[in-house]
Amino acid sequence: MNYELLIMKIREVNINDIEELSKKFDAYRVFYEKESDVEGSKKFLSARIQNKESVIFVAEVSEKQIVGFIQLYPIFSSTRMKRLWLLNDLFVEENHRGKGISTLLMDEAKKLCKKTDACGLILETAKSNFIGNVLYPKTGFSLDLEHNYYSWDNN
């Protein structure tokens, strides 16, 4: 058995986590080929937490070391007339991958969905995200082959 998972804790963040969380969030953004901006990450996450605009869960190992996070945004489904959660961000430090942490974070997102009586969780990932494209079906997500996804950027 993996000893590290025995001391793993999944919990919702609070504003006191912002220093450490912003470094993980910055690493997540760099992974997606964005320029490093720890201070910008801190401001962005602080606003989300203080304004209750997202729910963020973190994975901790001993001594409160954050090794991963998942961020969810509330949206709504008009046709189902219910809340829907957008799973926008999922990140686990490279040296902690392959230990089931992503699955634990995904399970916490599902618990939030049930707790808030939401109709489901949705997410988007790149076709090149091989790890995510294996993880998501393994954790009960279905690939939508019936709808087109469009975007418009205001840049």
Image (cartoon, rainbow, N blue to C red):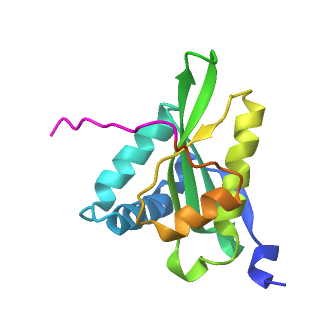
Residue at position x 15%, y 40% from top? 155
Residue at position x 65%, y 50% from top? 141
Task: Indicate left or right for 155 with 65 as reference.
Answer: left
Using the image as rendered, state which of residue 20 and residue 94 is in the foreground. 94
Which of the 4 quarters of the picture holds residue 28? bottom left
Residue at position x 59%, y 77% from top? 97
Extreme residue in the front direction: 146
Is 114 rendered above or below residue 26?
above
Q: Is the N terminus in the top left, top right, bottom left or bottom right quadrant?
A: bottom right
For the image, the number of numbered tags is 0
Residue 109 pos. (x, y %): 67, 46
Is 8 rendered above or below residue 10?
below
Is 64 rendered above or below residue 55?
below
Secondary structure predominantly adopted by residues drawn in magenta: loop
Residue 136 pos. (x, y %): 62, 57
**Which residues are drawn in magenta?**
146-155
Residue 18 pos. (x, y %): 48, 54
Task: Indicate left or right for 15 with 101 as reference.
Answer: left
Extreme residue in the left direction: 155
Residue 66 pos. (x, y %): 59, 67
Using the image as rendered, state which of residue 30 and residue 58 is in the foreground. 30
Q: Residue 152 in magenta?
A: yes
Using the image as rendered, state which of residue 43 and residue 59 is in the foreground. 59
Which of the 4 quarters of the picture holds residue 113? top right
Is 46 rendered above or below residue 10?
above
Q: Residue 141 in magenta?
A: no
